[in-house]
Image: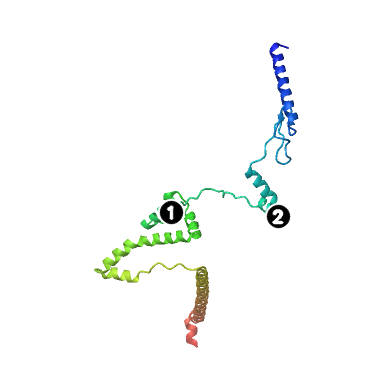
């Protein structure tokens, strides 16, 4: 052992002796591993705990103590309800295509006169996306309808101006049919049933007309056959009289 190590060991022993004397005077002193004493007294259970290496953690702060007491004071049912509460989650999926800017562009292009298919091709959007978005959002559907109605405004203004000078334009203006109002689901169903009934009626009429034409053709064929047979019978009746000799006729 070197001289420096011996000196360090002696100094350590002197420090330990001084600490022991201070601990004897203070009954609350607690020896820690490594020969160190805590002058603050023994650790209080629940408020202080020994850490690895012989160091003790002090008492918790006031806020931590209040939080711990609040959790302990809660009823088990309330605590379970808090633990089983649903965790907020973020909706996944692809980002929306019809942003507010894109919706404005769609309405502007429709008001110019383009169709929804042309607008979708221009903006690289599926036309069904616009239709489905309009079905989900009533405000967007009204904006689309307003934009489509604006398409006919210039033509209508020109027609009104021309009707003041030309009677043909005035007649066209009178015969012009406005855009039909939006129908409800019941009205659409009734209209569909009416169309089906009309199609059935037309098909039944066509079938009866075909049957009448076939029967008329059969009657015509039978009439022609009867005429042919009658003519053949008349020819056969004339042939024997014409085939007799002339002398034999005179004798009679």
Q: Is residue 30 above or below residue 78?
A: above
- On the image, numbered disc 2 is attached to which residue? 77
Please state the horizontal and vertical placement of residue 5, each as a whole percent of the image: 70, 14
Q: Is residue 53 left or right of residue 170?
A: right
Q: Is residue 217 left or right of residue 20?
A: left
Please state the horizontal and vertical placement of residue 154, each as a whole percent of the image: 32, 61
Q: Nearer the viewer, residue 88 or 136?
A: 88
- On the image, numbered disc 1 is attached to which residue? 103
**Among all residues in the image, which is located at the extreme front?**
25
Q: Earlier in the sequence, mark 1 or mark 2?
A: 2
Few, some or many residues within 10 Å of mark 1 (<14, 14–19, 20+): some
Q: Quadrant of the N terminus?
A: top right
Q: Is residue 114 left or right of residue 31?
A: left
Please state the horizontal and vertical placement of residue 177, each as a whole percent of the image: 38, 69
Q: Nearer the viewer, residue 172 or 38?
A: 38
Q: Residue at x 25, y 69 (%)?
A: 164
């Amino acid at each position: 052992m070197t001289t420096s190590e011996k000196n360090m060991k002696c100094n350590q022993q002197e420090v330990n002796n001084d600490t022991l004397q201070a601990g004897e005077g203070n009954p609350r002193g607690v020896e820690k591993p490594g020969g160190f004493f805590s002058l603050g007294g023994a650790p209080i259970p629940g408020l202080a705990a020994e850490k690895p290496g012989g160091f003790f953690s002090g008492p918790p702060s006031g806020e931590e103590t209040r939080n711990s007491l609040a959790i302990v004071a809660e009823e088990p049912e309330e605590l379970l309800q808090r633990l089983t509460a649903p965790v907020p989650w973020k909706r996944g999926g692809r980002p929306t295509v019809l942003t507010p800017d894109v919706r404005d562009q769609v309405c502007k292009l429709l008001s110019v006169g383009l169709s929804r298919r042309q607008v979708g091709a221009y903006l690289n959007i599926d036309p069904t996306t616009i239709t489905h978005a309009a079905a989900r959002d009533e405000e967007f559907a009204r904006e689309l309808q307003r934009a489509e109605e604006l398409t006919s405004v210039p033509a209508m203004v020109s027609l009104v101006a021309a009707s003041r000078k030309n009677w043909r334009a005035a007649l066209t203006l009178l015969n012009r049919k406005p855009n039909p109002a939006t129908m409800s689901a019941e009205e659409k169903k009734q209209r569909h049933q009416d169309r089906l009934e009309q199609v059935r009626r037309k098909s039944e009429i066509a079938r009866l007309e075909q049957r009448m034409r076939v029967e008329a053709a059969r009657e015509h064929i039978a009439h022609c056959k009867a005429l042919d047979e009658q003519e053949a019978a008349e020819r056969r009746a004339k042939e024997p009289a014409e085939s007799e000799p002339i002398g034999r006729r005179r004798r009679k």
